[in-house]
Amino acid sequence: FLPRPETDEQGGILAKDIHGKLIPGSQILAAPAHSRALVAGLSGEPTYLTVTEQGELHPWGIVDNCTHLGCTFPWNGNANQFQCPCHGSLYDAEGRVLRGPAPLPLRLTHAKIEGDYIRLSPWTETDPRTGKTPWWV
Ligand code: FES
């Protein structure tokens, strides 16, 4: 038995909780559809994962780092928005800016179930929200 590597050649990592423990994918997927889970992602950055309508892991994670001045922010499920408490920026459920001063959409990572865990890896392809090269690449 060989344990899965926590990091891979593409810069991917397995998602962890706030205590640095690997998070089982089953734990995230046990939540209701549209739930958000905050995990430690690439470079330890807090990253939101989403459970889809079908009870699967949404294929992208959204980095919890406001594109204005870098504050972290909560998910407001009632408003269906990310709401930055620092200067009032609002983002939709997919991380698009609804209201500034944030100038850019939130960064994405790839997210997928890998065995018992969740692998996050850098998103370098076209941003599916804008159809353009991601601003963070
Ligand atoms: Fe989020 Fe300023 S850091 S609005």
Image (cartoon, rainbow, N blue to C red):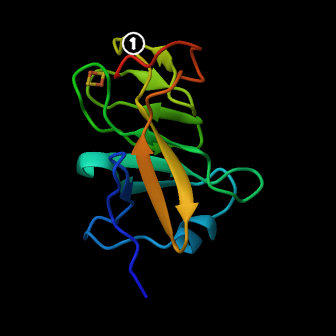
Looking at the rendering, the quadrant in which ligand 1 lies is: top left
Q: Quadrant of residue 94?
A: top right
**Whole-percent x, y for residue 114 in the image:** 54, 65
Compared across the picture, whether 81 is left or right of 53 comes to left
Say if 36 sits above or below 94 in the image: below
Residue 35: percent from left, percent from top: 59, 54
As drawn, the residue found furthest toward the right would be: 54
Report if residue 45 is visible in the image: no
Q: Position of residue 17 (x, y in %)?
A: 34, 66
Report the residue marked by disc 1: 100
Report the number of numbered marks: 1
Circle 1 — which element?
A: loop
* Residue at image point 54% right, 68% down: 25
128 or 45: which is nearer to us? 128
| Image quarter (top left, top right, bottom left or bottom right) of the N terminus | bottom left
Q: Residue at x 53, y 22 (%)?
A: 127
- Taking the spot 35% from the left edge, 16% from the top edge, the residue there is 102
The one nearer the camera, 134 or 74, is 134
Q: Is mark 1 within 8 Å of ligand 1?
A: yes
Q: On the rendered image, what quadrant is the C terminus found in?
A: top left
Q: Residue furthest bottom?
A: 1
Residue at 55% of width from left, 54% of height from top? 112
- Looking at the image, can residue 26 be seen? yes
Q: Position of residue 129 (x, y in %)?
A: 59, 21
What amino acid does circle 1 point to?
A: Gly
